[in-house]
Image (tube, grey):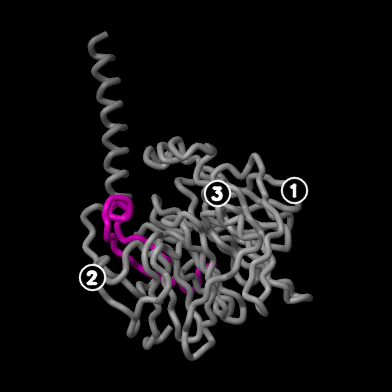
Amino acid sequence: MAKLVTIIAVVILAVVGQHICRFILALNPFHHTYNHSPGPCQHVPGITTGSEDLALTSTGRVFVSSGPDDRHGKLFTMDLNSPDVEISQVSIQPESLRDNFVPVGISVYEDPASKEIRLFVVNFKSFEIETFRYDSSTNTAHHIKTIKHPLITSPNDIVATGPDSFYVTNMSFFSNLIFVAFSLLTFLPVSSVTYYNNGEARTVADGIKFANGINMSPDGQVIYVASPLERGIKVYHRRPDNSLEFKNDIMVYSAVDNVNVDPTSGSLWIGAHPSFWQAVGSKSPGSQVLQVKHAESSNPVVTSIYANNGKELSGSSAAVYHNGHLLIGTVSNKMLHCKVNIPI
């Protein structure tokens, strides 16, 4: 009997020890960030409370979600084709929506026929999806509707596939933030991806440890899901019925946050946290931007385009590249614009 108890105790200690080691490796607490940039960089005036996610249109217009550290969430836009890169706040109608609006993940759908732009935004305060019609002539986002569904439990990011359809990541199958945090800290594989289409939804990928950012290849055939605890990107083949088939992981060895896709080249642009430990426990965590070329192939090429120890930019969460401009968003801090002087 004593021998059996000893064996059980050893097994339990081994399992707990393995979990602790994996937890430390994922948090990467001892990481040292070496600063580098692709060219001259400067902060974007007007952004001080975060630019958590960025969404790039086919014409080079960027939409920015800002709000986790603000009582009233905001949306901004910027034209990366303009010689003077200036940001402007998008008017949200009705204004009363902003009282309970904390935007995080954002996606753009461009109607190929009418050229209408629709914005899909994850509202972190209510765990719901807000949709808007964007009017460029007045720089106004007109609210269309609020989407909620039992399978949209704890949304983080979203990628639109049509005027009323999208994929959305769920951090956990819980909707309570305390339970969501517990499931993440314990490495439980309870994150998922939900596909929503005109009132109907279904789970199309699950068993993920913290599904964060999500995006889609230019041809719509591949879905990319960022998993910061697994320090990589999960690649899925999109079937004709919109279900997903897992293909492979792209390991980048950084806590990936949001992922954007270059509409021309198909390269991934990723805002990441070099140390997840610092991202959740430091006032000035480091920042990193990664580019992944040939992401759909069996031999993707991962390059660190920008990195900073937190003094210039803290807590990078998203990045987009267009026409020699690199824009880097943060969870709750400033936003950075860099001119890219290196081959991309």
Badge 1 density bin: few <14, some 14–19, many ≥20, Cα 10 Å: few
Residue labelled with disc 1: 199
Q: Which disc is residue 112 wearing?
A: none
Residue 118, quarter of the rendered image: bottom right
Quick check: marks 1 and 3 in contact, CB under 8 Å? no
Circle 2: residue type? Tyr
Residue labelled with disc 2: 34
Residue 220, quarter of the rendered image: bottom right
Separation of marks 1 and 3 at Cα, in angstroms: 16 Å
Circle 1: residue type? Gly
* Residue 261 appears in the rendering: no
- Which residue is found at the position 56% from the left and 46% from the top? 126
* Secondary structure found at label 1: loop
Residue 253: where, in percent of width, then height? Answer: 35, 59
Name the residue at the bottom extreme.
Answer: 83
Magenta stretch: give its range: 271-297
Whichever of callouts 2 and 1 sits on the residue coming sooner in the sequence is 2
Determine whether 1 is above or below 130 in the image.
Answer: above
Whichever of callouts 2 and 3 sits on the residue coming sooner in the sequence is 2
* Secondary structure found at label 2: loop
For the residue pair 292 and 100, the one nearer the viewer reads as: 100
Residue 232: where, in percent of width, then height? Answer: 42, 58
Badge 3 density bin: few <14, some 14–19, many ≥20, Cα 10 Å: many
Circle 3: residue type? Pro
Looking at the rendered image, the quarter that the C terminus falls into is bottom left
